[in-house]
Amino acid sequence: MALLNYTTQISAEKTVTEIQGILARAGALAIMTEYDANTVLVGISFKIGTPFGPTAYSLPCDVAAVNRILDKQMRAGKVPRRLVTTEQASRVGWRIIKDWIEAQLALVQTQMVTLDQVFLPYARTNTGETVYQRYIGAGMNGLMLEGPKAG
């Protein structure tokens, strides 16, 4: 199966604008886009209220990873060569992120989960890294995955 949204022609900039609107409607207090040195959109950060107060989150878009998948799928005959570009990878990656955010916020809307629950890995810590980055950096130290065994 080809990658989700692999044929999109919607620019990354337009998609990020849509994401900003989605986050604003969900109650975001601040939204910031992030670019690499080549002016490629690589992330979006936002602050939103949670039961623990305003919390900052950062969602990355790994354009190079998307491009590698498109290239692999092109070699397998699933994606046309013309769609294996950095620009297309950026369009596809951002559309996937938009779809993911919409799905997560739909779960929040139904009250099956809370916003801080679904976005937790992307929450910014006091050191500026995300919870997930801290988790990986600590090698799961301090994380008890199972309770004490009953004797």
Image (cartoon, helix red, strand yellow):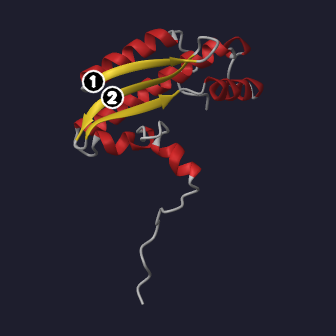
| 114 with respect to 68 (left or right) | left
Q: Amino acid at mark 1?
A: Leu
**Can you name the residue that lies furthest to the bottom here?**
151
Quadrant occupied by the C terminus: bottom left
**Residue type beneath disc 2:** Lys
The quadrant in which the N terminus is found is: top right
- Using a 10 Å C-alpha cutoff, classify the residue at mark 1 as few (fewer than 14 neighbours), some (14 to 19) or many (20 or more): some
Q: Position of residue 141 (x, y in %)?
A: 54, 61
Query: Mark 2 packing: few (<14 Cα in 10 Å), some, or many (20+)?
Result: many
Residue situated furthest right in the rendering = 75
Residue 23: image x %, image y %? 32, 23
Q: Residue at x 67, y 29 (%)?
A: 69
x and y percentages locating residue 16 in the rendered image: 44, 16
**In this rendering, position of residue 53 left or right of residue 43:** left
As drawn, 4 above or below 81: below
Give the residue at mark 1: 29
Which of the marked residues, 1 or 2, is nearer the chain's N terminus? 1
The residue positioned 31% from the left and 33% from the top of the image is: 105
Element type where label 1 sits in the image: strand
Q: Are marks 1 and 2 in contact (CB under 8 Å)?
A: yes
Checking the image for residue 47, the label placed there is 2
Mark 2: which secondary structure? Answer: strand
Total tally of numbered discs in the picture: 2
The quarter of the picture where residue 99 lies is top left
| Picture residue at 49% right of the left edge, 26% below the top | 96
